Structure formats: structure tokens, C-alpha cells
Image: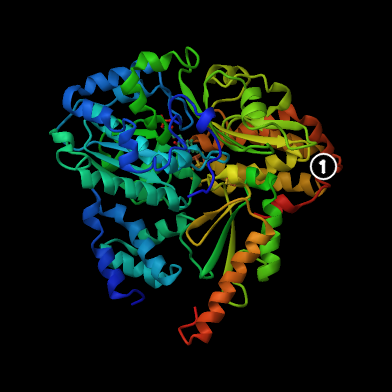
Amino acid sequence: MALSSHAREEIQALPPHYPQLRSAVMPALDIAQEELGWLPKEAMVEVAELLNLDTGYVEGVATFYTLFHLKPVGPHHFYVCTNLSCAFRGANDIVAHIRERTGLKEPGDISEDGLFSLDEVECLGACEYAPMMRYEHAYHYDLTPEKIDALIDAARAAKTASKEGGADAS
Amino acid sequence: MPAELRGSHGDSAGPVLTRLFGTPGLHTLSVYREHGGYAQLRRALTSLKPEDVHAEVKASGLRGRGGAGFATGVKWGFMPPPDGGPRYVVVNADESEPGTAKDRYLMENSPHMVLEGICLACFAIGAHDAWIYIRGEYDGPYARLNEAIAELRGEGIVGDKPFGSDFPLNIHVYRGHGAYICGEETALLESLEGKRAQPRSRPPFPAVKGAWGRPTLLNNIETLATVPWIVEHGGAEYAKRGTERSPGTRMMSVSGHVQRPGNYEVELGVTFEHVIMELAGGPLPGRTLKAFWPGGCSAPVLPASMLNVHTDMEALAAAKSMGGSGGVIVMDDTWCMVRAAARLLQFYAWESCGKCTPCRIGGDWAVRTFTRLLDGTGGAVDLEILDRIQDGLQNGRCLCGLGDSAGWVIMSSMRHFREEYEAHARGECELCGMRQEVAASA
Ligand SMILES: Cc1cc2nc3c(=O)[nH]c(=O)nc-3n(C[C@H](O)[C@H](O)[C@H](O)COP(=O)(O)O)c2cc1C
Ligand code: SF4
Ligand code: FES
């Protein structure tokens, strides 16, 4: 089993919130992904079992939507918008800067320190703050190389601190 | 939440949606109520009939702000008579049309205005449950809506007896998971039902067979956010604003190469000159405007020489474009149109749900053709190919509007900027230097 008993309970409690069972599939996948960081096949099988759905059906849904990660991503994942309004304001330079600072090259890569990954995404609906991105469940606006550096440094410092403090390294 | 409000507020506040924006704490129930919030819902639930609310919306002439511009009052009238079973109001907060940020702006700044509009729509069509479908990336607005709904529960406004009436109200929020097509209404319903978001063929229309097979009213966030004002002041008062066939005000998200990008509430019928040059401050220093997409990237692009076009839907149709989502994307002379169009085709190809052949194949084919034009390996024949692709994508050959939109990008950019395409076909473009970058970053 990939999921904790807590996550399993949460998933089993979902169906009554929806007029039909199937609507619970994406919220259930969210719970699984929140816990695991991504959706391995076993997690989809488990979600299917918990909701009494066909595994193929759950996989079909998980593979359709881009916010479900079918491969592992870093704990710090950049979603940088590169659609027009952001591209006009320098989004491509921001992407290049993130690549340079983290060593990320191909889409789907995780940086060597295990911390970062990057997706170039379509318009995130905050074009007046271009260039912008989603990072750690929040929007970051008016991006500059300096702002990116600050985030990267903070993530690295947190990792070092947690190692030094003897806590589980993330 | 954004530190700084960009758009209509204070002195420049629009007359209907944004008049209170900038008021500290407007997103809380107490401040919203201090300014008259929920008075219309209370009045409706305690002393109006559903038909009264519907009649005002009809009289207002309000047209949907999601993209298609369909008359809201007419749409509400499609709901069949009650049959004793459930029916739903489904609210489109997917907001994924590139260049469009206004639903986010409304939800962040005044979630209760949005929710009051939703409750009024529920009352008018006899639905006790509303489902807000919000794009998954909107963490902030999602939290804000949930906080606001929790406040309403605490006060019993969402509950079994709002304002002591016998009209139970419940509001649910459902998160999307990153797919542009979920904004299309039937794909949205599929997604809400927990399926892959592929559009359904119509009929049956959502009014007859919508969410979970039940009668459903589907409207955009901004459309419903306008309803409390209409109920308060009357449809006739709303209709005094704007033009005869495009009444009222609408939000315009202005972005790209302008000095003051932001969300501005404008009276329909003002010119793009006003929106882009005055409200958004015009071009960046030393630059000249080249083009603008007047209603999201799916609305055919117009050259800067057409800034005098008016914002009402009829004027835009006459200019061979459309009002669409109200997202105004502005581009200046530092960018190459072929490169911009290529980036948009990359978007449509990636977001195609794959159900219809012309859209599934045509998008990728266009991207490959654009790539040749961009990297200098293309030629005049590629312009003919693009012409064939755009025709194949349009005119009812695809099930939903995504295919048409992809075709319009090619068609309109070639119509107004043919010489840039020809330069690329010859392998020479001073603006982008024939860099491959855009198409390669897919
Ligand atoms: C490809 C495509 C994407 C769309 N995206 C959105 C969207 O993100 N938000 C929205 O409100 N409407 C969107 N629409 C329009 C909806 O299908 C629908 O017309 C609208 O939500 C109805 O609400 P309204 O009448 O209040 O405008 C889209 C349409 C198409 C064809
Ligand atoms: S036009 Fe494209 S997005 Fe729309 S249903 Fe057909 S394949 Fe899907
Ligand atoms: S284009 Fe980047 S947020 Fe809209």
C-alpha cells in the first residue's frame, strides 16, 4: 500500500459529498498526490479500490489532467507561465535563469540536489503581474532573477538547516 | 493575495462591479454587509418571486462574460419547469483563456459579491445547490471562496433557512486540474462528474441535461457577479449603460506591452484606444504598439491601426473579431507576429482534447509548419499550408470552439500581418532573428 491509513480514510469519506461517486475521483487523486508528491501506478490502483472504481478509469482521468504528476517532481516545483502576456514581459528569460541556477535541462528533470523541478505552463490567469509563476501553492508576481534567486536560496537553506538540525532531510 | 490592486479602484472605480474595490476588508462578510451586501438576496428570499429576479436580469440585457456573449436572461429561461428532482447552478471559474484574469480579480477582491450573485441565480431557477468549478491553480481565490462560504454558513445564509426563508442554499467548490478545455461548458460538466474533460455534443443542452444528468444553469463568474447590482437597481437601469445590444459594463484584463496592466471595468462601447492608451497607460517608453487581441487570444487579432474600434460585441464583430473573454493582450513593435502566433498555436495543440481529427492533427501540423517558418527552413509553401490548416479547423468542422479559435489565430494574424509571414518564408526577420526558441520550448 502506498497511502497512509489517514489518506485512505480521507478518500473513503469523500463520496457522500458528491451527487455521484465518480466526482470523488479527482479529489481522491489530490489526496494521494499531496501525500506522495506524485501519482505512482500503485496509488491509482489504491484510489480505484477505495472508491470501487475501475483502475483503467482512474488512470484515464489521472493522465488527462496536467496537474497530476505521473512522474516524481521536486519538492519545489516551478510552474512558470510562458504564454503571450508573460512571454512579452520576459518569461523566457525567467525560465532560462531558473535552469541556470538549478541545473535543470529537460522537462521532467529533477535537479541534482533533489530540490527543484520546472514546468513551463499556459496562462495562469494573472497576466497583469507578468511575468509570473505558481510555486509552492502560491502565485509569485513581477518575477525578476533576484526574486527567483531568493526562493532558490531559501529552499537550499531550509534543506541545510533540516540536515544540521538532525531532522529528516527533505 | 496580491499586495497591490492593479486595475479599477478608488477614483477610477467602475460603476457596477468594482465600485467598492479598494475598501479595506471588502472580502469579509461584515464589511460587504456594511456596504449593503446580501440585502438583495434577503429581499429576494423574503419578498420577491423567482420570476421577479429573472425578469430584471432579462430586462438588463446582460450577456454572458465567459466568452460566447449569450443573453443571460434568455439562458435562464431555458430551464425546464421543476420536476421535483435536483437542478444545479454551475459556475465557470476555470478562467484559462490566455490574457484573462478578471474572474480571479473579482473572486479575490469581492468573493461575497460573486456568492450573492450565485445565490440569486439559484433562487431564480429553483436550484438549491451551486457548484463553483475553479481552476486548480487558483489556490488564493479557492481559499478566499471557502472562507467566504464558511462565513455564510456561520450566519445561516448558506443553510436550510437563509434569512428565515424556506429556500435552502448550499454552495460547493470543485477544483479543476489543469486543462484549458475545462472552460468549455460541456467539458466542464464532464470534469465535474469526474471524467476526462472532452466536450459533449449538443443537444441536449445543459439546461435539459447538465451536471449529473440534471437540468443545469451554467454561467461565468463575472456574469453572476453582476446580478446583485441588477436586482438592486433594476434591469432597466443596467441597460442604460453600454450600447443597446451590448448593455452594461464589463471587466477587461489588459496585459502585455502596456505601462499599467490591470483589470479595468469599462462601459461597453468605449474604444480600445481608451482602454489601452488611457486606462492601461499606453505603450512602454520608446515603443510603438503593433497589435492587440481584444477578447482573449481566441478573439482574432487586430492591428494597432484599429484602436478606434469600440468594445461592444457588434463593433468587434464588424471588425472581424469578437468580445470573447474580455482579455486584452497588447503587443508592441519589439515582437514578431509570426512568433507570437506560433506560441499560441503551441497552446492550442497542447490543449486539444483529441476528440476531433482536424483539431488533434491540425494543431500539431500548424506547430511543425510554424517551426519551419521560425527557424528559417520554411518557404512560401508553408504559408499555403497554414492557410489550408486554418480553413480545416474552422466552420463547424470541430465539436467545440477550441478548433475554431486555433484557426482564427492563423487566419487573423495572416490577414493583418502577411508581410511578416512572407519575411519568414524568405528566411529573414529582423525582429526575432529567426530564433527557434518559441516552438522549441513546447
Ligand atoms: C475552448 C473554450 C474555453 C472556454 N473557457 C472558458 C472559461 O475559462 N471561462 C468561462 O467562463 N467560459 C469559458 N468558455 C465559454 C463557456 O463554454 C460558456 O459559454 C460560458 O462559461 C457560459 O457562461 P456565460 O453565459 O455566463 O458566459 C470557453 C469556451 C470554449 C469553447
Ligand atoms: S475542437 Fe479540439 S478541443 Fe474541441 S472537442 Fe474537438 S478535439 Fe476537443
Ligand atoms: S499569460 Fe502568463 S498569467 Fe496570463
Asked whether A6 or B32 is in front, the reply is B32
User: In the rendered image, is residue B217 in sight?
Assistant: no
- Say whether residue A106 is left or right of residue B108: right
Q: Quadrant of the N terminus of chain A?
A: bottom left
The chain letter for the residue carrying disc 1 is B
Name which residue lies at 48% across and 18% down: B246
Between A145 and B397, the one lying in front of the other is A145
Looking at the image, which residue is at 67% across and 45% down? B343
* Residue sitting at x 74%, y 34%: B384
- B381 shown above or below B175: above
Q: Which residue position holds label 1?
A: B431
Percent x, y for residue B91? Answer: 36, 38
Residue type at the position of mark 1: Leu
Where residue A37 sits in the image (x, y, percent)? 45, 69
* Horizontal and vertical percent position of residue B286: 80, 36
Q: Where residue B427 sits in the image (x, y, percent)? A: 86, 43
- The quarter of the rendering in which ligand 1 is drawn is top left
Q: Nearer the viewer, residue B422 or A166?
A: A166
Please identify the quarter of the rendering in which residue B123 is found: top left
